[in-house]
Image (cartoon, grey):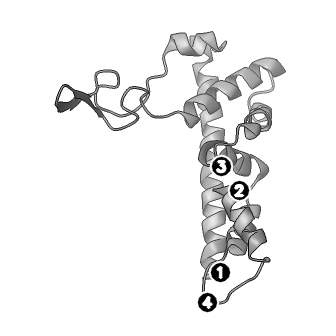
């Protein structure tokens, strides 16, 4: 999404139009968001893996200082993985799967469409059950910056129209 927007903005010669929203409007609107917010959007919505490491570092800096730096990064990385992959692996979020010639409720997610992130999965990434509150704190940072980016971008686009 971001690459296409930037590419189309460059192709259009960065022309502005008072009649309609242009790629230039979208690029400018997105530029008003925080660094972490833009990295999160690049990671999740533009599938840009280069945003993973810098986003992990920025989230880690917002976690409690009494944790060792590498542990903050580990928690941040696990939170990013879970945030980026919210759908069930079996049904891809559809809540149902094909069995024979009919659709049935997905047994993996019990028909929720959501991925189950188990303690075992988390422990394989180095996040123990007693770190759950810290994982929650990392999710909070992600949610705040994701929503912030959406609000800033939409407000700026509204001003353009």
Provide residue 27's location: percent of width, then percent of height.
Answer: 73, 66
Give the alpha-carbon distance from disc 1 to disc 4, as whole Å.
9 Å
Is disc 2 surrounded by few (<14), some (14 to 19) or many (20+) residues within 10 Å?
A: few
- Give the crowd class for mark 3: few <14, some 14-19, many >=20 residues within 10 Å: many
Quadrant where the image shows the C terminus: bottom right
> Which quadrant is home to the N terminus?
bottom right
Determine the secondary structure under disc 4: loop
Please tell me whether residue 36 is drawn above or below residue 135 in the rendered image. below
- Identify the residue at image location x=59%, y=24%: 133
**In the image shown, does 130 or 101 lie closer to the viewer?**
101
Residue 3 is tagged as 2
Q: Residue at 60%, 10% (x, y): give it.
A: 123
Dot placed on the residue nearer the N-terminal end, 4 or 2 = 2
Disc 3 target residue:
41
What is the C-alpha distance between the residues marked 2 and 3?
12 Å
Name the residue nearer the viewer: 65 or 7: 7
Q: Quadrant of residue 121?
A: top right
Residue on which the image places disc 4: 19
For the point 30% across and 34% down, the residue is 95
Residue density around tag 4, few if under 14, some if 14–19, many if 20 or more, within 10 Å = few
Residue lying furthest bottom in this view?
18
Marks 1 and 2: which is nearer the front?
2
Residue 17: % across, % down: 68, 86
Q: Earlier in the sequence, mark 3 or mark 1?
A: 3
- Residue on which disc 1 sits: 160
Q: Is residue 35 above or below residue 22?
A: above
């Amino acid at each position: 999404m971001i690459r296409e927007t930037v590419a189309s903005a460059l192709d259009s010669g960065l022309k502005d139009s008072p009649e309609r929203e242009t790629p230039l409007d979208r690029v400018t609107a997105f530029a008003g968001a925080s660094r972490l917010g833009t990295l999160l959007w690049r990671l999740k919505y533009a599938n840009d893996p280069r945003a993973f490491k810098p986003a992990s570092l920025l989230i880690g800096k917002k976690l409690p200082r009494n944790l060792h730096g590498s542990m903050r990064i580990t928690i941040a990385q696990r939170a990013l993985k879970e945030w980026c992959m919210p759908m069930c692996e079996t049904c891809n979020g559809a809540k149902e799967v094909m069995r024979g010639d009919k659709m049935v409720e997905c047994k993996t997610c019990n028909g929720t469409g959501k991925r189950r992130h188990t303690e075992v999965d988390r422990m394989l990434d180095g996040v123990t059950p007693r770190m759950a509150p810290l994982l929650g704190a990392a999710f909070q940072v992600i949610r705040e910056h994701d929503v912030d980016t959406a609000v800033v971008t939409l407000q700026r686009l509204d001003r353009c129209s």
